[in-house]
Image (cartoon, grey):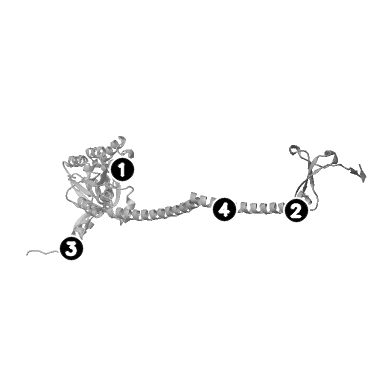
Amino acid sequence: MAGNVYTVGQVNAYIKNMFAQDFMMNHIYVKGEVSNCKYHTSGHIYFSLKDESGLIACVMFAGQRGGLSFRMCEGQQVIVFGTVGVYERGGSYQLYAKEIRLDGEGVLYERFQALKRELEEMGMFAPEYKKPIPQFARRVGVVTAPTGAAVRDIMNISRRRNPFVQLILYPAQVQGEGAKESIVRGIRMLEQQQVDVIIVGRGGGSIEDLWVFNEEAVARAIFECQIPVISAVGHETDTTIADFVADLRAPTPSAAAELAVWDYQIVRSTMQEYRRKLGQRMQQKLQIERMRLAGYQTKLKYLHPGNKVREQRQRTVELEDALRQLMDQKILVARHRLALDMEKMKGLSPIGKLNRGYSYVEGGNDGEKHVIKSIGQVQKEEILSVYVTDGIIYAAVTGVKEERHGREE
């Protein structure tokens, strides 16, 4: 084998040294359109610069962020000042940016902004046109590529969250020639199938890869669809016209699946909790009603007519006893008074007087008997009736004798 043999590391180190010794590569301004821009959690910014003839990878480390006065995004035309160096481990070269300034908007970015302004003025982004996403969808339509991470993520998450939800996939072309027509057909076909919600999207990529979701035809198809549409285009930092028009934007296809497919286990646990609480409340309600019923029963016993009748009977018996006692007292008093009156009558009784030797004299004929109290009431030879204890004596008047103060006539 002729010549020297070098290792890969030696070759990369040699090339790196060549770049380091080249003054131009250490102080260079590069103009191009920003593509595939990513802000890393470490603070570094990774992006590419491209034009019609090529592309160069770029990085701006966190320590150089002071040379950036705006937030970079896809399609911007920028001028980057920095150093072109070799990344030995990967055997690639890239532009290490120290300063970045805007150099006008890129063609795609201008188109994006123009269409966004036009559709916004037409009211297609207005919140009042946003349809609510059904809480318990049974059939979910998906418009995306039949292969790739997006559809796999949607299927896996749907299966995990709720295996009873039916996924209907329209295998659309999401990039390149004919992509917008394919996506529009997919939306309209799933609308005819009367699914509950539609997911439209794809995985992440450059602005060129995602451009089909910035097409006016796709935006109008989403806006005119009577079925709620969730956009799921790219990664969280990617934003397209479809995101503004859709009824709901999901940052990723996985998030779209989370939003569209309700979690069966959560709903099941919630229903079990509702059932438990309902059972408790029913038991509490039954207990309260039982107590109320017992109160009504007690009240009914107290207010029952039979009780009233018994109470009145008892009251009648008590009144009857009281009346009898009063009558007995009255009779006793009357008997006592009668005894006294009888004793008085005994003293005034004619029979008593007769028994003591007195007599009772009547005169006149049988039709007009009268008590003889004076000698002026009798005539000579008149027959008088003299009543004594054991009978009547009939006597004829032979004469009268008046006695007045001891005088006789």
Residue position marked by numbered label 4 in the rendering: 317
Which residue matches tag 3?
9
Looking at the rendered structure, the kind of residue marked 2 is: Glu
Q: Give whichever of 150, 196 is nearer the camera.
A: 196
Left or right of residue 265, residue 323 in this image: right
Q: Dot 2: within a 10 Å radius of its alpha carbon, few (fewer than 14), some, or many (20 or more) residues?
A: few
Nearer to us: label 2 or label 3: 2
The quadrant of the rendering that contains the N terminus is bottom left
Q: CA distance from mark 2 to mark 3?
A: 162 Å
- Marks 4 and 2 sit apart, C-alpha to C-alpha, by 38 Å
Circle number at residue 132: 1
Q: Mark 4 or 3, which is nearer the eye?
A: 4
Q: Distance of mark 4 from mark 3, alpha carbons?
A: 127 Å
Q: Are marks 2 and 3 in contact (CB under 8 Å)?
A: no
Q: Nearer the viewer, residue 316 or 384?
A: 384
Disc nearest the viewer among 3 and 1: 1
- Amino acid residing under circle 3: Gly
Dot placed on the residue nearer the N-terminal end, 4 or 2: 4
Disc 1 to disc 2, how far (Cα)?
A: 116 Å
Q: Amino acid at mark 1?
A: Pro
Residue 14 drawn at (x, y percent): 18, 60
Do the residues bearing badges 4 and 2 touch, measured as CB atoms within 8 Å?
no
Ranked by sequence position, the earlier of labels 3 and 1 is: 3
Q: Residue 370: x percent and y percent?
A: 78, 40
Say which of marks 4 and 2 sits in front: 2
Query: Nearest the camera: 44 or 232?
Result: 232
Crowding at dot 4, Cα within 10 Å, few <14 / some 14-19 / many 20+, comes out as: few
Q: Which label's residue is closer to the chain start, 4 or 1? A: 1
Q: Nearer the viewer, residue 328 or 311?
A: 328
